[in-house]
Image (spheres, grey):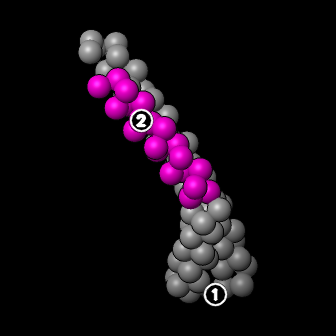
């Protein structure tokens, strides 16, 4: 295994990490912004509302896209084992 192959493996690992984490992070950020706007308009500054909404969104994304995320991780791991 030379330097170029190691660089390709690291690049692919970063791509897989970004593809898996992006839906969770983007949706939780979107919900956080929406909840901040709602709290600013209604002047209800309860932190547990924000946390619960983000938690529900993250659990929902994991339930809906968890299989796809696991499949991507499995494909990456199998690719690593083939290279070894």
Judged left or right of residue 52, residue 42 is right
The answer to whether 15 is drawn above or below residue 22 in the figure is: above
Residue ID for mark 2:
78
In space, the residues marked 2 and 1 are separated at their CA atoms by: 49 Å
The location of residue 9, given as percent across then percent down, is: 38, 26
The location of residue 7, given as percent across then percent down, is: 35, 20
Q: Main secondary structure of the magenta part?
A: helix
Q: Is residue 43 visible?
A: yes
The location of residue 80, given as percent across then percent down, is: 36, 31
Residue 77 versus residue 4: which sits nearer the camera? Answer: 77
Q: What secondary structure is marked by label 2? A: helix
Q: Residue at x 37, y 27 (%)?
A: 82
Q: Classify residue 67 by image quadrant.
A: bottom right
Q: Which residues are magenta?
A: 65-84
The location of residue 23, given as percent across then percent down, is: 60, 52
The answer to whether 35 is drawn above or below residue 28 in the figure is: below
State yes or no: discs 2 and 1 in contact (Cβ < 8 Å): no
Q: Residue at x 35, y 23 (%)?
A: 83
Badge 2 density bin: few <14, some 14–19, many ≥20, Cα 10 Å: few
Q: Residue at x 35, y 16 (%)?
A: 5
Residue 74 is inside the magenta segment: yes
Residue ID for mark 1:
44
Residue 66 versus residue 61: which sits nearer the camera? Answer: 66
Badge 1 density bin: few <14, some 14–19, many ≥20, Cα 10 Å: few
> In which quadrant of the rendered image does the C terminus lie?
top left
């Amino acid at each position: 295994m030379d330097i170029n192959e190691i660089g390709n493996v690291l690049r692919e690992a970063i791509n897989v990490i970004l593809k898996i984490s992006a839906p969770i992070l983007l949706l939780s950020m979107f919900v956080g912004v929406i909840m901040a706007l709602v709290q600013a308009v209604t002047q209800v500054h309860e932190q547990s509302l924000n946390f619960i909404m983000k938690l529900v969104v993250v659990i929902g994304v994991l339930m809906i896209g968890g299989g796809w995320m696991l499949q991507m991780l499995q494909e990456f791991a199998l690719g690593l084992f083939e290279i070894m």
